[in-house]
Image (cartoon, coloured by chain):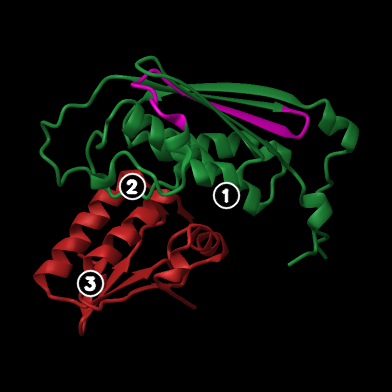
Amino acid sequence: MIEIKQKEPIAAGERDSMKNEMALEFDAVSTNESFARVAVAAFITPLNPTVEELADVKTAVSEAVTNAIIHGYENVYGYGRHGELKPVHVKVQEGKVYVRCRIEGDILHIEVEDKGIGIENLDKAMEPLYTSKPELERSGMGFAFMEAFMDDLEVESKPLLGTTVRMQKKLGCSNFIQGED
Amino acid sequence: MEEFKVIDNYLCVKLPEEVDHHKSAYISENADRYILGEQVNHVVFDFEATRFMDSSGIGIIMGRYKKIACFGGKVFAIHADRQIKRILYMSGMHKIIEIME
């Protein structure tokens, strides 16, 4: 008979000392949005996050990276495939998006940086349903989602210099809420 | 195209596994072509295959809603899993569209 052993949860002491860092740098095109969130999701798996936590982090990263691409660098389309309904000669602005992640104990820190146009009115930008690009059918929920899905959100922006979004989330609460639901 | 199907006066849009900004232009533009071309009244978004959605998905739904609501059209969401439902509720979409099992 096969015995299935339950995966042992990481001991509290071991978890506190866990430290890990990574940094990504990629072109500011929409093709890379899924890459960024999948990479971050893979990075945090050692923390044993719940399905929900994983989805939360992925959504928040996706929002931040999408913001950097379409608002920071104003690249609305990617390198092709699915953007193909638009003329191919649409110029792709050059620019990089930087994603840095740090795990300290059971806290995940994410930093998404762009060197794009920056945000002039930060308070307005953070307002739910406000979007500077209504013609693109943006819902204006980006910052609201980041705030809702992460524990802490900090935005720093300088017009014409770029924007940095810092987020924090405590992970691995699965040990406490197992059995619920 | 398999993702877009017209049944009576409903347009059924089968959403991909991941709905993000990268895919949203393709979905919106094609859906609009059907809405205008086939004169459909209602739009049904099928989330059966969808495992991930961010605010771009909300943008798609809101955009379609605006296009058909003034003619008395309705927007439906079907097969949404827990995560998708959370996002729909969080953004207040449940007030303007019908979320069904």
Between the C-alphas of marks 2 and 1, the distance is: 21 Å
Q: Depth check: A53 or A68 in front? A: A68
Q: Does residue A73 lie above or below A83 as drawn?
A: above
Q: Depth check: A65 or A124 in front? A: A124
Between the C-alphas of marks 2 and 3, the distance is: 20 Å
In the rendered image, residue A25, in percent from the top left (x then y), is placed at 44, 21
Q: Depth check: B39 or A32 in front? A: B39
Residue occupied by mark 2: A138
Q: Which residues are magenta?
A: A104-122
Color of chain A here?
green
Counting labels gives 3
At label 3, the amino acid type is Cys
Q: Depth check: A162 or A108 in front? A: A162
Query: Would you say residue B82 is visible in this rendering?
Result: yes
Q: Does residue B73 lie above or below A9 as drawn?
A: below
Color of chain B here?
red
Q: Which mark is residue A55?
A: 1
On-image quarter of the N terminus of chain B: bottom left
- Quarter occupied by residue B17: bottom left
| 2 or 1: tag closer to the N-terminus | 1
Q: Residue at x 34, y 45 (%)?
A: B21
Q: Does residue B66 lie above or below A113 as drawn?
A: below
At label 2, the amino acid type is Arg
Q: Does residue B88 lie above or below A16 as drawn?
A: below
- Quarter occupied by residue A130: top left
Please give left or right for residue B96 compared with residue B36 in the image.
right
